[in-house]
Amino acid sequence: MNLQKSILQTIAFFDLFDFPLTAEEIKEYLYKYDKAVHIKEIKGTLEEMEEVEKIHDYYVLKGRGKLVDVRKTRKFIAEKFWGRTRQYGQYMVRVPFVRMVAVCNNLAYDNPTELSDIDLFIVIEKGRMWLARFIITLILQFHGVRRHGDKIAGRFCLSFFVAPEKMDMEPLLLKPDDPYMAYWTRLLTPIYGKKAYQQFIEDNQWLSEKYGLKFPDINEKKFSFQTTSRGKRFWEWVFKGWFGNLIEALLKKTFKKRTLKKAQKLGPEASVVVSDEMLKFHNKDRREEYRDEWKKRF
C-alpha cells in the first residue's frame, strides 16, 4: 500500500467518529503501512493530498474542518470521565482475581460525548469469572454508576470480561478486514495490570503483522493503580479453594442461564459470548457497518 492511501484510510477511519488527527497521530496510527516512515515524510505527503485539509494542527477530510472544535470539546468531557474512572477504578482493582482493568472504545482516545458510557475491558483469573464480575457489578450498582437500561451517560459498561488465556483478540476479527477491532486493540488503555497488559501485547502481535499498528511503550505512569493490596491477596486466599469453587458454581448456575436466555432474544447483529474464559455482551455489533461507511470515505 502506498503512503497516501494509508494516510487517507487512517484519517477516514477516525473521521467516522468525528476525530481529527495531528500528523504525529497519523504516523502512530498509520493503517497497514509496514515501512519505516519519518514524520517529515508524513507531513510532506499530507501537503500533496487533495482529499485532506489542515486546520490548525489537525488534518481532516475536505469539508470536515468543524471536527477540530468537536475534538477540543470532547477533550474536556474525557478529562471528567477519566477522573470518574480513577475514582471508581480504585474499588474495581481491589476485587479478588482481577488482573487488569482497561478502558476501551471512545474514552480510550479521549473522544466521548456527554451521552457516552465508559466501556471497560476486564481480565479475571480463570475459574473466578462469575465471582469477580458479580462483585464488580455490586460495587458499581451500589455507587449508582453502572450502565443499565436507559441509564448510560457517564456510567460504566461491564460488557467484556476475559481470562488471561483469552486475551488474543484475533479470533474475534471479521473477515477479510476489521479496522474497528484493530484500532480497538491498539487503543486499549489499562489503568491497572501491567503484567497482564504485557501479556496482552504479546498475545496480539497480529496487530503489527496484519495491520501495521504497533502498541505504545509501556509507561508505568499510565497505570493509575500499580500494586495489589494485602486485602485483595487475603480475599483471593479465602476464595481460592473449595469455598471459592462453590460460590463460583452457584453464581455461574444463576447468571449463565439468565444471560443465555437474554441473548436468544437479541437479533443477529448481537455479539454475545458466554464461556468460562470469556463473557462478552454487545447487543449490537456495528463493526460491519463501520467498515462499510469507512470504505465510502476513500
Image: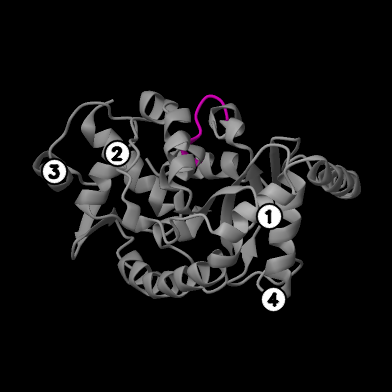
Which tag is nearer the camera, tag 1 or tag 2? 1
Q: Which residue is mark 3?
A: 39
**Majority SS type along the magenta span:** loop
Numbered badge on residue 30 = 2
Q: CA distance from mark 2 to mark 4?
A: 39 Å
**Label whose residue precedes the other's in the sequence (1 or 2):** 2
User: Which of the two labelled residues, at mark 2 and mark 3, occupies the earlier sequence position?
Assistant: 2
Q: Residue at left 46%, top 52%?
A: 190
Q: Quadrant of the C terminus?
A: top left
Q: Earlier in the sequence, mark 2 or mark 4?
A: 2
- SS at mark 3 in the image: helix
Residue flagged by tag 2: what amino acid is it?
Answer: Leu
Q: Which residue is mark 4?
A: 144
Name the amino acid, label 3: Ile
Q: Position of residue 297 (x, y in %)?
A: 40, 44
Does residue 247 appear to the left or right of 136 in the view shown?
Answer: right
Q: Is residue 205 left or right of residue 53?
A: right
Q: Is residue 213 visible?
A: yes
Image: 257 above or below 169:
below
Whichever of labels 1 and 3 marks the residue nearer the N terminus, that label is: 3
Residue 47 relative to residue 168: left or right: left
Q: Quadrant of residue 252?
A: top right
In the rendered view, tell whether residue 63 sits above or below residue 211. below
Q: Residue at x 37, y 70 (%)?
A: 75
Task: Say which residue label 1 marks.
Answer: 235
Nearer the observer: mark 2 or 4; the answer is 4
Q: Label 3 neighbourhood size at 10 Å, few (<14), some (14-19), many (20+)?
A: some
Tell me whether circle 1 and circle 2 mark residues in contact (CB < 8 Å): no
Q: Amino acid at mark 1?
A: Trp
Which of the pair 259/211 is nearer the observer?
259
Q: Which residues are magenta?
A: 174-180
Question: Is 68 situated above or below 271?
Answer: below
